C-alpha cells in the first residue's frame, strides 16, 4: 500500500495562508502565480480511497485567505454553511488511526493569523504552539516522505 502514496506538497503565503495539495501542477501554480513559497512535502497521502483510509476534505475562505483541511464531514459542512468557506473537494485520503507505519498529521490554528497549519513534525508542532498557534489534534495519519 505504501508505494501508492504520493507527495502532499506544502506551501506558505507570507502572513496569510498554508496551502497543501497533492497535485504538482497546482503546487507550481500556487508558487508561480499566487505568491506562495514551497515548504516541501508535508507527507505522503493517498490519491484514492484505499482500505482503512478516509477523505481529507479541503475548503477555502477567500475573505480570510485560509485553507482548512479536515477528515470530519460535519466540520467541513459547518465551515461551508456557517464560516464562509468554499468546498474544494477532497485533498486525498489518510488513515484515521495509525496503520502500517503511518505517523500523525498534527493540526494547528492561529486566530491572530487566521491560518491553519498541518505538520508531521513534533518539534515544529511544539514550536508553533509556543509561537501562538493552538494545537487542535491529529487530523489523520500519513507517511513521511523519503529523505
Image: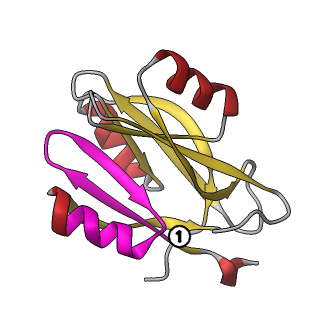
Residue at the image position 24 percent from the left and 53 percent from the top: 12
Q: Which residue is mark 1?
A: 144
Question: Residue 10 in magenta?
Answer: yes
Question: Residue 145 in magenta?
Answer: no
- x then y, percent, for residue 88: 50, 46
- x then y, percent, for residue 90: 60, 52
- x then y, percent, for residue 51: 85, 63
Give the colour scheme shown.
secondary structure
Residue at the image position 73 percent from the left and 55 percent from the top: 98
The quarter of the image holding the C terminus is bottom left
Q: Secondary structure at mark 1?
A: loop
* Residue 71 as seen in the image, left or right of residue 107: right
Residue at the image position 44 percent from the left and 19 percent from the top: 83
Q: What segment carries the magenta color? A: 7-31
Q: Is residue 99 above or below residue 3?
A: above
* Residue 124 as seen in the image, left or right of residue 104: left
- 130 or 56: nearer the viewer: 56
Q: Is residue 47 above or below residue 34?
A: below
The quarter of the image holding the N terminus is bottom right
The crowd level at tag 1 (other Cα within 10 Å; few <14, some 14-19, many 20+) is some
- x then y, percent, for residue 114: 28, 28
Amino acid at each position: 500500500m505504501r508505494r501508492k502514496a504520493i507527495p502532499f506538497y506544502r506551501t506558505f503565503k507570507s502572513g496569510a495562508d498554508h496551502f497543501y495539495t497533492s497535485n504538482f501542477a497546482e503546487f507550481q501554480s500556487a508558487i508561480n502565480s499566487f505568491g506562495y513559497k514551497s515548504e516541501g512535502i508535508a507527507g505522503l497521502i493517498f490519491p484514492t480511497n484505499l482500505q482503512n483510509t478516509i477523505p481529507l476534505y479541503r475548503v477555502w475562505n477567500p475573505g480570510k485567505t485560509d485553507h482548512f483541511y479536515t477528515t470530519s464531514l460535519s466540520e467541513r459542512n459547518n465551515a461551508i454553511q456557517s464560516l464562509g468557506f468554499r468546498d474544494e473537494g477532497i485533498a486525498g485520503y489518510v488513515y484515521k488511526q495509525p496503520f502500517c507505519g503511518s505517523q500523525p498529521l498534527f493540526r494547528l490554528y492561529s486566530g491572530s493569523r487566521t491560518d491553519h497549519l498541518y505538520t508531521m513534525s513534533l518539534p515544529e508542532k511544539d514550536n508553533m504552539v509556543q509561537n501562538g498557534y493552538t494545537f487542535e489534534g491529529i487530523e489523520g495519519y500519513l507517511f513521511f516522505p523519503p529523505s
